[in-house]
Amino acid sequence: MIRQQYIVYTEELSEYKVKSTKVFKGNGKLKKKFYKKESLKLQYELVKLQKWVIDNNKRLLVIFEGMDCAGKSSSIKEFNNYLNPREARSVALSKPNSKELGQWYFQRHLKQIPNAGEIVFFDRSWYNRAGIEQVFGFCTQEQHDHFYSQVNGVEEMLVDDSILFFKFYLNISHKTEKNRIKDRENDPLKSWKLSDLDYKSLNAYSKYEVLRDKMFRISGTTHAPWCELDANDKKRARINAIRYLLLNIDYEGKDESVISGVDKKIVKLYNEGKYHGKCNHMA
């Protein structure tokens, strides 16, 4: 059964049931041992979810947006850890070629929406036009405005066609973004993640904030709300993203003791252009 997305804040989470010293480091971030244990519980639920998606020919589309270095790719990797790769895939489109530039803006993205029995994760999406393209002049103001005149209708059609559709935004502070760029500079295994645009984006942080809030206000709708995650601690963001998604799908065999809600310190829900910061059940 499909229903509008809702949020449940609860303190009945594993991280609040034991001594905080066993869960959190001195800086407030999750300890690796606790994270691995909690993550494994959620992985079992994700495997159940995928079986339900396949058995019932459902289509699940999950969008990840966020500041540069916020952890979009690693979050998708966390979701995909134990899923059957034949029925779950990640999409990270490169910049449009000359042919695609002449197409309807949404066209190349919609080619990637899931087939029956499939889960698809977008590592960035059509919301490039709401953020990075606007910041760096890759689109005109008219194109930006036209995007907003269409996006809610496009997403409503997806949901109306019974696609299970989720939008996550990973938010980090300017300081965290600086530190993660520095970390990538010093790690040869992560150097491929860096580009000139990352440094320019860092300097445009305040512009991104304004456009992010505009995006929540205009495209945070009842049929396709925005779930914002505080991703300054990637581990806490990942487990709460999974909790939120599993909470909102009535898949077979759900363990309610594992999926009881999300952490109010980490998750915010934007629908009807507003932030809903309390339990918000919708039938």
Image (tube, rainbow, N blue to C red):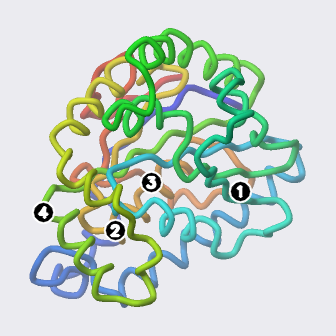
Marks 4 & 3, CB-CB < 8 Å contact:
no
User: Image point 29% across, 72% down: which residue?
Assistant: 15
The mark found on residue 175 in the picture is: 4
Residue closer to the observer: 89 or 200: 200
Q: Nearer the viewer, mark 3 or mark 1?
A: 1
Marks 1 & 2, CB-CB < 8 Å contact:
no
Q: Position of residue 281 (x, y in %)?
A: 43, 29
Kindly indicate the quadrant of the structure image that contains residue 84: bottom right
Alpha-carbon span between mark 1 and mark 2: 23 Å
Of pointers 4 and 2, the one earlier in the residue sequence: 4
User: Image point 69% across, 24% down: which residue?
Assistant: 102
The mark found on residue 234 in the picture is: 2
Alpha-carbon span between mark 2 and mark 3: 21 Å
Kindly indicate the quadrant of the structure image that contains residue 165: top right
Q: Nearer the viewer, mark 1 or mark 2?
A: 2
The mark found on residue 260 in the picture is: 3
Q: Nearer the viewer, mark 2 or mark 3?
A: 2
The mark found on residue 49 in the picture is: 1
- In the displayed structure, 36 sits above or below 103; it is below
Of pointers 2 and 3, the one earlier in the residue sequence: 2
The 10 Å Cα crowd at callout 3, few under 14, some 14 to 19, many 20 or more, is some
Marks 2 & 3, CB-CB < 8 Å contact:
no
